[in-house]
Image (tube, grey):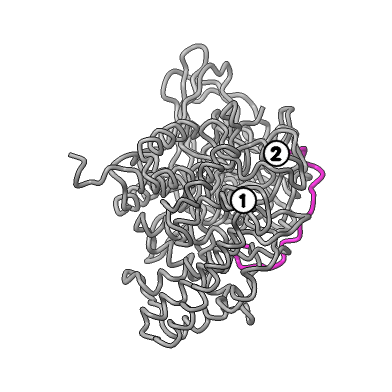
Amino acid sequence: MSSLDLALIGNSQISALIDARGRIVWSCMPRYDGDPRFCALLAGTTPPKAGFAEVELTGLHNAQQRYRRNSAVLETELRDDRGNALRITDFAPRFKRFGRFFRPMMLVRRIEPIEGLPLIRIRVRPTYGYGHQRPELTRGSNHIRYVMPDLAVRLTTTAPVSHVIEEAAFLLDRPLTLILGPDESFADDVAETARAFQIQTDDYWQEWCRYLGLPFEWQDAVIRAAITLKLSSFEETGAIIAAHTTSIPEAPDTERTWDYRYCWLRDSYFVVSALNALGVTRTMEEYLEYIMNIVAESQDGYLQPVYGIIRERRLDETVVNPLPGYRGLGPVRIGNDAYRQVQNDAYGSVLLACAHVFYDQRLSRPGDQALFRRLEILGEQALRRWNQPDAGLWELRSRTAVHTYSAAMCWAAIDQLARIARHLGLRRRATEWARRARQIRGEIIAQACAADGGSLVASFGGDSVDASLLMLPQLGLVRARDPLFLSTLARIERELKRGDYLLRYAHEDDFGTPTSAFLVCSFWYINALAEVGRRREARRIFEQLLTRRNPLGLLSEDIDPTTGALWGNFPQTYSMVGLIRAAMRLSKPWEKAF
């Protein structure tokens, strides 16, 4: 049965998910949101007939998997019941070449015998049309071409081509190389090229990690989260996707199966903050450029919630019939109709993210008055929308309300414009935006109070709480030790907490009552505990959450509060960013650590 005990490899152009036996079970080409050429992850409960690539070891007894230190290069060791063993090394090449980054649409697989003579079969079974069709095969002396209507890929290998095509068993008595990539002739020595690519890719990631800003504690967890965040960036445009998969359900027996291979603007504030804390300024700047291009393309400042990785606006949602879904739990969806929704929190997220270009002197293109005037258009939208109904942060599909978090983010947009104007010396604009921010802040707090005045609530005039209220002190709308927030925190603990995990909300929505906890909400809760002075408790919960990462150190979107099983799209950028930010907040400072 499929599991989220998966490893991620990639190079900021393509990626692949590899299971504990070393099978490639998910990989989209030619980019993250493309057709999955390997789609076995969504092939249901029976063993898939296609959509995977594997090295099957006869008599498999044990499998162990690990990343190379500070790297996105993966090693899987398989051992049979007679003591024979092999190692599979998987990676997507990424390194500097001719003054630019070399990140081809390419997966490299090196197979080495490490004990005895393992008996193996090599199976490479790509698909297209979301698992609906198998490609046409043609062969050469050292390669196999997989020809599809929209793409042709070439497997160049030192393994016997006939053995690969026929999937015949043979003894692994020497190292083998498989390079799956563009349909181009391979002029160089295949094994030597793969070896050199691995060395250079390893060197790239280890050098990249050397410059990370890390907390004193939990460095391994933060490094893996940082690498995962980098692997979620699409370097051509700077977009950072929410996850690498589509349609992993949020919980068993639910239709909450969404396509997350796109870029949500609501994530921008959190992602940029994490990248800034890590010191990953190049990726941060590329992501900000992606966002600012979206702003520039919007004449009136209207922002939709989600865009494609090359800033596509239409992401029409359809159901794919050939694929049964993860563990048979469909439907499998392509596209995401959330792009049609109104989500007013995006204006604050974008303004808070873009504010970095005005203050961070490491960036190559500092913010100026021209950019400020463009951002003021977003502020005007925030002024019009702060008290208007929307689908909210949680993207409710059949109902709207004036959500407190959306209103708070609109206020944050306006407040941030006042701060940027002061920074630029624009006194009149600073005064005007600050006046509007003060007025709106008072009205939000008044309208977001419960009827009895005992706490804040999730929507104006509502009677329930949601986890987004935990973010209000960080935004500056209320103080963390304000009695109103402390009572809100206590109510969230009573109504949303399940063990050490938090639900997004506890009320029924379009698909029933949620049962899985949303992992980033647990990280928000940890940060809120730290802000109100409950630091020891925050550290305990954080360390417990770290134990819920999969064996490769990765997190999905959701978790079953009872079993600890991971659910939802994977790996989830929001969750990994939550881990980074919580670790930075809770760690002992370096100067007091010795």
- The answer to if 316 sits in the magenta stretch is yes
Q: Nearer the viewer, residue 311 or 107?
A: 311
Span colored in magenta:
308-325
Measured as percent of width and height from the top left, residue 526 is found at 44, 42
Q: Is residue 199 left or right of residue 35?
A: left
Q: Nearer the viewer, mark 1 or mark 2?
A: 1
First-in-chain label (1 vs 2) = 2
Q: Residue at x 48, y 83 (%)?
A: 432
Q: Residue at x 41, y 57 (%)?
A: 275
423 above or below 334? Answer: below
Judged by its main secondary structure, the magenta piece is loop
Residue sitting at the far front: 452
Q: Amino acid at mark 1?
A: Asp
Q: Is residue 214 left or right of residue 139?
A: left
Crowding at label 1, few (<14), some or many (≥20) Cα neighbours within 10 Å? few
Q: Is residue 327 visible?
A: yes
Instruction: Residue 42: give its label.
Output: 2
Residue sitting at the far right: 321
184 above or below 25? Answer: below
Measured as percent of width and height from the top left, residue 164 is found at 62, 34
Q: Residue at x 43, y 82 (%)?
A: 430
Q: Disc 1 marks which residue?
A: 452
**Mark 1, secondary structure of its residue:** loop
Q: Tell me the quadrant of the picture where the N terminus can be found.
A: top right
Q: Nearer the viewer, residue 315 or 272?
A: 272
Q: Residue at x 50, y 49 (%)?
A: 10
Q: Amino acid at mark 2?
A: Leu
Q: Is residue 125 visible?
A: no
Instruction: Give the quadrant of residue 367.
Output: bottom left
Measured as percent of width and height from the top left, residue 262 is found at 62, 57
- The answer to if 386 sits in the magenta stretch is no
